[in-house]
Image (cartoon, rainbow, N blue to C red):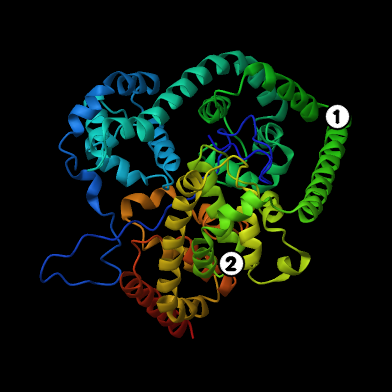
């Protein structure tokens, strides 16, 4: 297991699996070929999810393979109570463990063969029969019993352990949580501050309160109060097997004091500020030490063997740090590690003040090569580095290259759209949501889109042109095609221009 310790990626958090931020996948895979004679009408035909999840298993031995692991799947069903949201979470963990993005809700609905009647219930539950059938569809044509166990079942079993462990530990925390909730009046800020206290200091800055509210608490980003039961349930769902009540309890007591005693709050704020300054100084010192020490001959040799792959990644994304950060996070998660906090990525790439002034922030091919050298373990073979790192990188390169190609076709129209609305976030959001299947739209608000897709403050009312185009580009997948997006773009441009003329 690649732990990333001692490789410039920061120490592995004891809460590593708890506070994972997810890449939001919004642009669904391309729709199936249209029937003969069907007219594509802008604004009426949406980019639909290709319904591969609704198809029968592609492996003739799928049923037999899944039956071998029937007890594990039944244990998963029992542990989750068949609740759709928790099954979706475990399937997302399986996807991420294999270097894939979490499946969107519509895919999971198709996979589980849920009907509208099933989804009408307030707490959607899945039968064991539906779950077993879904796992059969996960068996790929070339899967054997052994690799299906390694890729899927082990992840499932780990999540069952996590779920059972969390259920036990949360019972011990219920009364302390009740006291904390009362001390802060259930205010989101007070609960967020406590939650952040559980993170390593170098990871806290990457999660805004709005992102935490939406992604962990599963509430609208602007929510100012959270109910006790809702907070407790979602805290439980975020726990890992390394989390225990004994280590969390002191933090609960600390924040009860922070919320009830002004003197304790002031002391806590000063201590937190000091910790941040110390963390920044430590990262700067480590960067200087790395520069003087340099990579080993083994690390240089391993990465040199994949110089073409490193160069291809750099070319595909023009060295943009935002993309490189996501690539390294994907590699880390594919190897059961946590996402990298932004300071760690800056440390890996040895970014300078001049680099940070670039728009967009970017790194050279030489900086990227050094970053890869730092994550080579001293005892790692060429074959293992290729399997664990380069294979994931190649997938990210294809995605980035495809997105760059599509955006070159879309840039003029995207610029026209931005000009027509003056960069108004609401208008750009409206266009973006027109690309999303209708049944997936209610789950995303403007503020969530601002924070998670555009990566700006959730309350932002305008978005700069280049920031919008780069963020749109980074949200694209290999199945997204300019030819299908252009008609939707043209419709929104025409509507905005017509509104402008009408207003005059």
Q: 111 or 71, which lies in front?
A: 71
| Res 241 visible | yes
The x and y percentages for residue 155 are 42, 30
Is residue 49 left or right of 234 when viewed as pictured? left
Q: Work out whether 62 lies above or below 287.
A: above
Q: Answer with mark 2 or mark 1, whichever residue precedes in sequence.
A: 1
Q: Work out whether 478 lies above or below 160.
A: below
Residue occupied by mark 2: 319
Q: Work out whether 191 lies above or below 207.
A: above
The x and y percentages for residue 23 are 49, 50
Q: 10 Å neighbourhood of mark 2: few (<14), some, or many (≥20)?
A: many
Q: 139 or 25, which lies in front?
A: 139
Label 2 sits on a secondary structure element that is loop
Q: Which mark is residue 166?
A: none
The x and y percentages for residue 441 are 38, 53
Label 1 sits on a secondary structure element that is helix
Residue occupied by mark 1: 264
Q: Residue at x 42, y 73 (%)?
A: 405
Q: Residue at x 64, y 17 (%)?
A: 245
The x and y percentages for residue 100 are 41, 47
Is residue 211 left or right of 123 when viewed as pictured? right
Q: 385 or 494, which lies in front?
A: 385
Is residue 19 left or right of 46 when viewed as pictured? right
Q: Residue at x 25, y 60 (%)?
A: 31
């Amino acid at each position: 297991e690649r732990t990333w310790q001692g490789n410039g990626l920061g120490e592995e958090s004891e809460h590593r699996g708890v506070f994972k931020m997810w890449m939001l996948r919004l642009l669904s895979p391309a729709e199936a070929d249209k029937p003969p004679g069907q007219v594509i009408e802008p604004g009426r035909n949406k980019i639909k999810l290709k319904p591969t999840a609704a198809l029968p298993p592609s492996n003739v031995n799928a049923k037999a393979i899944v039956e071998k692991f029937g007890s594990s799947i039944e244990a998963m069903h029992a542990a989750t109570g068949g609740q759709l949201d928790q099954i979706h979470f475990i399937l997302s963990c399986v996807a991420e463990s294999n270097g894939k993005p979490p499946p969107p809700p519509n895919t999971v609905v198709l996979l589980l063969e849920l009907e509208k009647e099933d989804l009408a219930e307030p707490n959607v539950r899945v039968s064991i029969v539906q779950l077993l059938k879904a796992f059969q569809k996960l068996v790929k044509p070339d899967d054997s019993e052994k690799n299906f166990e390694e890729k899927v079942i082990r992840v499932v079993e780990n999540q069952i352990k996590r779920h059972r462990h969390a259920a036990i530990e949360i019972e011990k925390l219920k009364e302390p949580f009740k006291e904390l909730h009362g001390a802060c009046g259930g205010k989101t800020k007070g609960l967020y501050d406590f939650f952040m206290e559980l993170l390593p200091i170098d990871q806290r800055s990457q999660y805004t309160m709005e992102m935490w509210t939406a992604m962990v608490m599963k509430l609208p980003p602007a929510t100012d109060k959270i109910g006790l039961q809702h907070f407790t349930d979602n805290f439980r769902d975020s726990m890992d097997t390394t989390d225990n009540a004994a280590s969390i309890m002191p933090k609960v007591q600390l924040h009860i004091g922070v919320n009830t005693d002004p003197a304790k709050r002031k002391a806590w704020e000063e201590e937190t500020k000091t910790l941040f300054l110390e963390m920044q100084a430590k990262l700067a010192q480590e960067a200087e030490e790395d520069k003087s020490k340099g990579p080993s001959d083994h690390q240089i040799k391993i990465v040199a063997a994949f110089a073409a792959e490193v160069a291809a990644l750099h070319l595909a994304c023009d060295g943009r740090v935002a993309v490189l950060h996501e690539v390294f996070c994907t590699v880390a998660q594919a190897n059961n590690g946590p996402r990298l906090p932004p300071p760690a990525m800056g440390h890996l790439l040895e970014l300078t003040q001049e680099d940070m002034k670039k728009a967009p922030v970017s790194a050279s091919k030489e900086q990227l090569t050094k970053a890869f050298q730092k994550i080579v373990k001293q005892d790692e073979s060429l074959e293992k580095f290729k399997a664990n790192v380069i294979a994931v990188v190649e997938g990210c390169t294809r995605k980035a290259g495809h997105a760059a190609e599509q955006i070159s076709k879309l840039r003029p129209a995207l610029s026209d759209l931005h000009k027509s609305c003056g960069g108004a976030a609401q208008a750009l959001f409206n266009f973006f949501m027109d690309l999303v299947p209708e049944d997936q739209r209610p789950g995303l608000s403007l503020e969530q889109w601002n924070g998670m897709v555009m990566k700006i403050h959730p309350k932002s009312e305008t978005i700069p042109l280049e920031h919008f185009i780069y963020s749109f580009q980074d949200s694209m997948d290999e199945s997204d095609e300019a030819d299908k997006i252009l008609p939707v773009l043209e419709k929104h441009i025409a509507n905005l221009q017509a509104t402008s003329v009408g207003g005059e």
